[in-house]
Amino acid sequence: MDHADHLKRLKFRAWHRGTKEADLLIGGFFDRYSAEWSAEEADWFENLLAIDDVTIMAWAIGTQEPPAEIDGPMMRRMQVLDYIPIAK
C-alpha cells in the first residue's frame, strides 16, 4: 500500500474512536501532523491506534507514562496538546 492510502485509512480510524474526546485528541493529532509523517511515523501511529483510548489519553495528558515502544518524539508531540480545537 502506498503512503497516501495508508494515511487515508489512518485518518478514518483516528476520527472514529467512539467518543468525542478521543476523536478530538487522536484525530486532531492526526490532522495537525500527518502531512509531514514518514512511513515509520505513520506505522507508529497505526500501532498507537491499536491501544485503547483511555490509555492513549492518559499518556497524552501525562497521568501515565507510555511504554518505551510508544514513548519518543511522536508521543512528545502528542503531549503538547496544541492541536485540539477549543470552541470559544
Image (tube, rainbow, N blue to C red):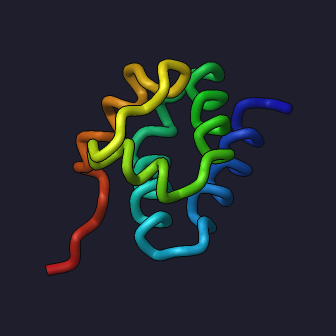
Left or right for 10, reference 77: right
Residue closer to the observer: 55 or 44: 55
**Quarter placement of the C terminus:** bottom left
Residue 62 in the image, given as x and y percentages of width and height: 27, 42
**Quarter placement of the N terminus:** top right
Query: Residue drawn at (68%, 45%), measured in percent from left and top?
Result: 50
Query: Residue drawn at (67%, 57%), measured in percent from left and top?
Result: 13
Query: Residue drawn at (40%, 58%), measured in percent from left and top?
Result: 25
25 shown above or below 77: below
Query: Residue drawn at (74%, 39%), measured in percent from left and top?
Result: 6
Residue 18 in the image, given as x and y percentages of width and height: 60, 73
56 shown above or below 37: below
Left or right for 75, reference 4: left
The quarter holding residue 41 reads top right
- Count how many numbered circles sit on residues in the image: 0
Left or right for 49, reference 35: right
